[in-house]
Amino acid sequence: MPRRSLHYGWIVAAVTFLVLLVGAGIRATPGVLIVPLEHEFGWSDATISGAVAINILLYGLIGPFAVAVMERFGLRRTVCVSLFLLTIGIALTALMRAPWQLMLLWGVVVGSGTGMIALVLGATIANRWFVHHRGLVLGLLTASSATGQLVFLPLLASLAVHLGWRSVSFTVAAVTLALIPLAALLLRDRPSDLGLPPYGGTIIEPNVIGLQNPATRAILALRDGMKSRDFWLLSGTFFVCGASTSGLIGTHLIPACIDHGIPEVSAAGLLAMMGIFDFFGTTGSGWLTDRVDSRLLLFWYYGLRGLSLIYLPFSFRYSFYGLSLFTVFYGLDWIATVPPTVRLAEKSFGKENAALMFGWIAAAHQIGGAFAAWAAGYLRTETGSYLSAFISAGLICLLAALLVPFIGAGRPGRGRTSPVGPERLAIEGAIE
């Protein structure tokens, strides 16, 4: 029998996994820096959380434009430029002395750079390179965010404690810089660049490049998407996802632990443990998405997440061991919502528009994260506790679980709209 060779899509997926892993490590870094920055500069938690909120907001808002830029200028070029931008922005944070510099560097520069290598990159790779196992691949790529926490957080927390917070900036910048040659060498835009069909496919899909401005492409897609009830339901529930993960737990769990006498390195270890369980939870979610109704999955994900957040404030009574139970329960559910949300976006808007529309849905995720990052910091500053932040987040997760069953309900075509695709834009550009 002829020996079957490895499809190049798996190599592209592996490199993308590393890119998303490093991006996750970058996004997790503020959780390590909040307390050191408070001690050295006297900045309040609310001030630092404001920079984190800008970072999270831009991370989401850049996403849909990043998809359009990838369609116009190529995936490999976009990723390499983004990694270079991140290297510069992160390295310069070691020189900052004023809050506005934190806002500019970590908020604007790093937020924009991570937005270009956000979850929309994983959705783009899965849709372009895979027909079979698309949900599983998306689950693996999404799980890289959890693995980023696992790899980076304990090391970064240890560096911050023993060598100072500036060593954290230099270390993350060096790792990001080292990834650029690998991405330039191995990433490819589409299977057709190598004369291949997608994995599991039989047809070599043409590589159509849109000639329209990427911003126009993204805005027109948003305009058409906003006419769909499914878009609002998916965006609303994903807003809750962002508020309850990266905005709240990813940013504030370590300071909350320190408030209760748990050392910073131990608290970072909890997030790393959460990353281990989320890797399996999100990968399993991708596998289930290929087999189970995505609405049913999301109902359980948001419901269990809400219950775990309501439990969190009471877990501090049992110190590190009570938090370990929360970590396992919450970690399995951390970003397991992504594969079924992408699948629902594909069913609502079509395969050719799934990544771009998910980009706008993910923007709602980051708006939620930005709001929660700021609001939780504000509540802690005003009340001295995260209690109200954790309880509120749990309640809105339960509300999201109740909204999920209405996605695509009552309409045979699931309310599909047709945002402007790259093929139509190419034709329009040629006419112009």
Image (spheres, rainbow, N blue to C red):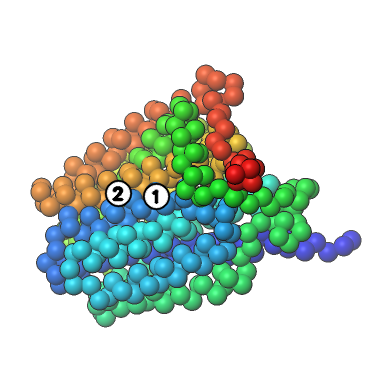
Residue 240 in the image: x percent, y percent?
35, 40
Q: Amino acid at mark 2?
A: Ala
Q: Is residue 213 visible?
A: yes
* Residue sitting at x 46%, y 64%: 82
The C terminus lies in quadrant? top right
Alpha carbon separation for disc pair 2 and 1: 9 Å
For the point 14% across and 60% down, which residue is it? 44
Q: Quadrant of residue 5?
A: bottom right
Residue found at x 40% / y 64%? 25
Where residue 28 is drawn, which disc sits there? Answer: none
Considering only vertical position in the picture, is 173 above or below 277? below
| Residue 352 in sight in this render | no
Quick one: label 1, few (<14), some, or many (20+) residues within 10 Å? many
Residue 329: percent from left, percent from top:
38, 47
- The residue indicated by pointer 2 is 370
**Extreme residue toward the front, this view:** 432
Name the residue carrying label 1: 60
User: Which of the pair 115/26 is nearer the observer?
Assistant: 115
Q: Where, quadrant-wise, is the N terminus in this rendering?
A: bottom right
Give 317 or 212, whichever is nearer the viewer.
212
Q: Secondary structure at mark 2?
A: helix
Q: Quadrant of residue 347?
A: top right
Within 10 Å of disc 2 (Cα), the crowding (few <14, some 14-19, many 20+) is: many
Q: Amino acid at mark 1?
A: Gly
Which residue shows up at 41% across the image and 61% down it? 113
| 14 left or right, relative to 51 | right
Residue 163 is situated, as x and y percent measured from the top left of the image, at: 26, 80
Residues at discs 2 and 1 in contact (Cβ within 8 Å): yes
Q: Quadrant of residue 10?
A: bottom right
Q: Earlier in the sequence, mark 2 or mark 1?
A: 1
Q: Position of residue 138 (x, y in %)?
A: 56, 50
Q: Secondary structure at mark 1?
A: helix
